[in-house]
Image (spheres, coloured by chain):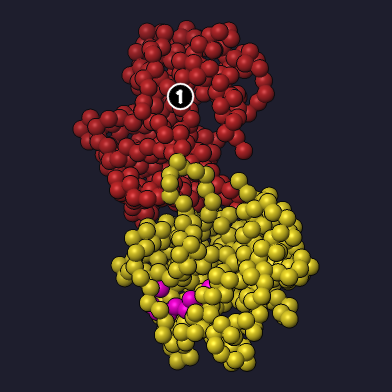
Chain colours: A yellow, B red
């Protein structure tokens, strides 16, 4: 059974859903499925080392890396114990950067779309551009501290600048290949990919997965927790709930159909788990987000 | 009788109502009442000298001056013949910088509101800030030239940055006093102010005004044209039409009432003049702008 979700104090101001964790050395960045949120996240790495789990991929973290993390993406950073990463994280709701159409084909959140579609969440900022990114972060920090008239607007502008730079950069590096991380066993990486592709099937239990990975259930449990920070079942459930959130907003299917399509045994199980991980019921989530549409 | 309005090629793209006249030395900036438009304008002076007529005030132009000109404001720049001003003008529709509320008390167009209310349209940018303003202009120019993905969005962001800086600056200098320009005769300045206050009265003819100014009608005609670039009657009519535009959007009064309140002898005269100066009928103007509201 999943533990009670840890509520974080993000986004208390519905008019200004933004938060920054500035130049943080100690705490590992993580968004484990205790709480699946719709906010988007950017993590910039100044220095240090570590590993970042994002969906089924592990990424090395090093200087100049920027992680682009759409809402409802399971992720966790594991800082190196000797040289832990120094990073700044920005959290925001997509509503914050929505602007009227300019007749442009450009979409300000395209980096996040691209990350989600290609399942590539890391971009290494070229050295010549790192100054720009760091300076935007400094400007945001200054605005947050000074709170001069219009500081919220100023932060929105800086954030949009950062996203625009990022979009232009990512459209250049789209063809680059990603180096896989070697410190994670191959069977574990394959298993995460397998879960990513098959979490909508309702027989995805520990036994099935351990057979698939050709390891014992106890070894799977232990190793999974070691590499991802959470249990197999919590991970699978979080994947499923993330999936239902998307379906709730993009389809008109009934809750029962959605629960079934996303691999839940019963509507009541889906309902309970959704409430636990998101803080609201599936129906309320659908209604609330439709209100903000358009 | 007023001449046929000269149509300018601004704002052909309704999704991106923006234009820049970059580092222009020769042509005097002017928006004479041939065409009363709703677009807002910023004029930054790099160097040179001249005089700027804005509503009933004449302003000296010199290095570092920024003119803040709301829509429908009669204005004209008279560059010095020996050392003409070098300036950049930005034109935009207020719709371009409208953003969702952030629960902020800050209003991005407050400089224009302030200029309109206090009838002070000039601010001298402190030397320490001029670099910021000029660099924003350079960024806009670069975006316009390169036309990279998202350049329209980038220009909107730069424009908003400029406005934000300007708002913060103007809130500091609000108490500063303005030096009157001595090269324009006192009676002319008084007359412009008188027209500004009394243009809604329908007996504001050349005879009334020349009596008011204690000069002959022929001297008034000549001098008025010399200092403002247009005839007295055109000036009064432009003032009246600017006034009706505001009333059309802010009141529910009938066209007849508005024509009467703004000093027109008849509805048909108002209708004809409105069409001539704005390109649309009063009714179409009201409907068109209400469509874009909210």
Q: Considering depth in this image, is A171 or A262 the residue closer to the camera?
A: A262
> Foreground residue, A193 or B166?
A193
Residue B194 locus on image (x, y percent): 51, 21
- Circle 1 crowding by C-alpha within 10 Å: few under 14, some 14–19, many from 20: many
Magenta highlight range: A55-66
Disc 1: which residue: B36
Quadrant where the N terminus of chain A sits is bottom right
Q: Residue at x 32, y 37 (%)?
A: B21
Q: Can residue A37 be seen in this snapshot?
A: no
Q: Is residue A220 above or below residue B277?
A: below
Seen at 45% across and 92% down, the residue is A82
Residue that lies at the very extreme toward the right in this rendered image: A268
Image x and y of residue A129, in percent: 34, 66
Please give left or right for residue B285 compared with residue B10 in the image: right
Q: Can see residue A55?
A: yes
- Pinpoint the chain carrying mark 1: B
Q: Is residue A243 above or below residue A101?
A: below
- The number of discs equals 1
Mark 1 residue element: loop
Residue B107: percent from left, percent from top = 56, 46
Q: In front here: A249 or B4?
A: A249
Query: Is A244 colored magenta in this rendering?
Result: no
Q: Quadrant of residue B261?
A: top right
């Amino acid at each position: 059974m999943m533990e009670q979700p840890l509520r974080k104090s993000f986004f208390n101001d519905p008019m200004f859903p933004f938060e920054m964790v500035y130049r943080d050395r100690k705490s590992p960045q993580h968004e484990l499925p205790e709480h699946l949120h719709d906010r988007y996240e950017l993590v910039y790495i100044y220095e240090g080392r570590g590993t970042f789990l994002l969906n089924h991929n592990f990424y090395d973290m090093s200087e100049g890396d920027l992680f682009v993390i759409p809402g409802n993406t399971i992720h966790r950073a594991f800082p190196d114990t000797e040289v832990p990463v120094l990073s700044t994280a920005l959290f925001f709701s997509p509503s914050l950067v929505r602007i009227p159409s300019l007749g442009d084909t450009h979409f300000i959140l395209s980096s996040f779309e691209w990350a989600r579609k290609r399942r590539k969440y890391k971009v290494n900022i070229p050295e010549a551009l790192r100054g720009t990114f760091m300076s935007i972060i400094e400007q945001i920090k200054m605005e947050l501290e000074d709170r001069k008239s219009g500081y919220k607007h100023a932060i929105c502008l800086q954030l949009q600048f950062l996203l625009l730079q990022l979009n232009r950069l990512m459209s250049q590096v789209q063809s680059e290949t990603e180096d896989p991380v070697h410190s994670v066993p191959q069977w574990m990486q394959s298993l995460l990919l397998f879960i990513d592709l098959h979490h909508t099937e309702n027989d995805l239990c520990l036994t099935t997965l351990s057979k698939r990975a050709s390891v014992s259930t106890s070894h799977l449990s232990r190793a999974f927790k070691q590499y991802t920070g959470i249990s197999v079942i919590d991970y699978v459930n979080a994947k499923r709930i993330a999936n239902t959130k998307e379906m709730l907003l993009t389809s008109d299917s009934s809750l029962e159909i959605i629960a079934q399509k996303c691999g839940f045994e019963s509507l009541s199980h889906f309902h309970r788990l959704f409430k636990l991980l998101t803080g609201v019921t599936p129906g309320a989530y659908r209604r609330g987000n439709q209100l903000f549409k358009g």
